[in-house]
Image: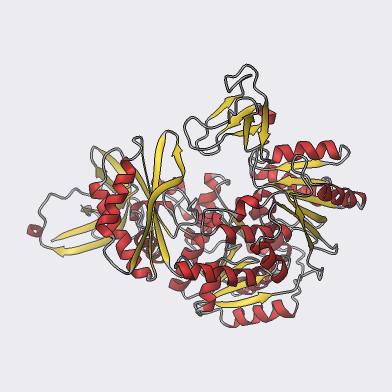
Amino acid sequence: MLNIATVTLNLPLYKTFDYLMPDSCSSIMPGSRVEVPFGNKKIVGIVILCKSNQKKEQTHYKLKKIAKVIDTKPTISKDMLSLCTWASNYYQHPIGQVLFNALPQQIRKGKSIKEDDFIALDKEKLIIEQNKIKLNDEQNKIYKEIYRNRSKFISYLINGITGSGKTEVYIKLTDAIVKNCGQVLVIVPEINLTPQTVARFKKYLNCNIFSYHSSITEREKVKIWNYSKNSNLDVVIGTRSSVFLPFKNLKMIIVDEEHDASLKQQEKFKYHARDLSIIRAKNLNIPIIIGSATPSFESLYNSDINKSTQFNLTKRFFKTELPKIAIVDTNKDIPDDGISNFLKESIKTQLNKKKQCLLFIGRRGFSSALMCKTCSWVSKCNKCESYMTYHQSQKLIKCHHCGYQEKILQNPGGCEKCNIYPIGYGTQRIEEKIKKLFPKARIARIDSDTISNIKKLNEFVNKANNNEIDILIGTQMLVKGHDFPDVTLVGIIDIDSGLYSLDFRGLEKTAQLITQVSGRSGRKEHGGQVIIQTRRPNHPLLYVLLKKGYIEFSKENMKERKKIGLPPFSYISLIRASSTVKNKSLLFLEEIKRKFNNEKSIFFYGPAEAPIARKNNMYFFQILFGSKNRSSLAIKTQEIRQYMDRKKPYNIRWTLDVDPIDLY
């Protein structure tokens, strides 16, 4: 009789391996870590299945023995094993890599974690002066309904206008769950949002609250992982990876800003934290709340077909009016370095009132490219099909796709005397212009060039909230969920690129951006104003969005989606292939289409050049395929993935993305 353990490894392999259990251990529980011989070395693996009572002659090859059993108790719980198995099958990613992705780095390496490695938290020492949260009628109705159904799986969508107090509802529900000895997971899309969210929860809750994201130390990650496993913490506020924490008594999951693309992992294991959270809540039979001022079309559609229960918050928590919105036609009021005369005068008015202004531009750097007026030279990357952004402070042009950078030559185009001028606007160019216009104003630029870690972000937020900054200039990093109570004017420098995006989600993302950015204005007792600069003031998106609101816009836009059968009315997968030989990957994708385009239930778009057709000297092509039936697509996606594994030419790289967010 043989006792065999099926082990999965942290390798890009879709198969598992059988090993004999050691003589000293007759049984090992699934989810336990073991050390196994693999090739000429020993590596850490995770047991996913144990088999016994098999006759020796049934095995046609010699099995190696497990070298060491690391865990006496499973490191991966049944709940997490189930979630990771589902994720592996759905996203077509190796189960070993999915399971190891759910563990902190030290635990992946096989380090033993003892329960007394970290001192158990003493809740009696957490007594603080607790503020009492007060809800309005809309909020209280939502709270009571969710709390009444707290012991079963229901997916709730809270659609609340910016400043309507979604977070206060989360806090009230969390308080009730924690007082009944339950744990709560709150997922936010960005590291930048964790400090303010933690601060708001701690203001009202007298319990153990921790943040979890990639910027904390490895030791801190292990500590929080261990605390959550042993019920030594009550609330975790984290980014997408926190969905894999091994809670012992998880009773509610909250996903804030659920529309945000940052909730989708874009590299390697391409999972969506919102969707995995819904699966985990369903497995545990607990409620999940997803909230946004601009819900994704997928979430709105799920509400329409009764897959989720929708609540609406229509009033601002601090009873201020929604900001007044003005459209500036930049064909008439021509901007000077990005700033129209109307915007300039509006900023001056607010500064005279001692109020703050926020200027949003979606691109960092000084300008999107440089050009020579004499010879028409353009700063284009030699390794990519993209333009290089000018960073004036460093006197460099940089490719934001492959990372290549170079200094600006005196005559880069080769003509006798290049006359270089900037094309487009970036945060640096806007900052320089604002400093010239308002030399006495205190100005701060916020983008990934100036904010490299969470400490710098906290310093900036504190300065902004203490009125040490008059004009805030930044990218999406600045506007995502942040609350600046004294900002009364928001200027959106240019939205035209979003109005003509090739991505079928382009208008949805632009509408979300406009709504979210506008929501930064007039959030407390002050009224607000929003100024949008555009060359297309009569664009249908702007009319519907600004006159009727985001929900009406979504209804109109989803009619177009339905006509062409794209999400949320279908499900899609994306394959992107690359090669150093230009048409090699194109031919490979055409071969896949010919072989698998044989069912009416599956549709194919492409293959075609990827949005960035050349990156780091690799040529990229992509193909999109989908179905109105999720199960049919899942089967076809697996078949195509298995075919690519077997047939892929040696010099072609490919990635598979199920439910892709960014197509362009």
Q: Horizontal and vertical percent for residue 414?
A: 57, 19
- Farthest residue to the left: give it: 57
Q: Is residue 473 visible?
A: yes
Q: Quadrant of residue 181?
A: bottom right
Q: Horizontal and vertical percent for residue 301?
A: 52, 73
Quadrant occupied by the N terminus? bottom left
Q: Is residue 280 visible?
A: no
Q: Nearer the viewer, residue 525 or 67?
A: 525
Q: Horizontal and vertical percent for residue 562?
A: 48, 70
Q: Horizontal and vertical percent for residue 594?
A: 26, 55
Tell me what residue is drawn at x 71 percent, y 79 percent. 138
**How was this image coloured?**
secondary structure
Q: Is residue 302 left or right of residue 485?
A: left
Q: Quadrant of residue 294?
A: bottom right
Q: Is residue 224 left or right of residue 86?
A: right
Q: Is residue 562 above or below residue 502?
A: below
- Farthest residue to the right: give it: 352
Tell me what residue is drawn at x 47 percent, y 66 percent. 567
Q: Is residue 299 above or below residue 652?
A: below
Q: Nearer the viewer, residue 254 or 296?
A: 296
Tell me what residue is drawn at x 9 percent, y 59 percent. 58
Q: Is residue 5 left or right of residue 399?
A: left
- Farthest residue to the top: give it: 416
Tell me what residue is drawn at x 46 percent, y 70 percent. 569
Q: Nearer the viewer, residue 637 or 243?
A: 637
How many circles with numbers are drawn on the protein?
0
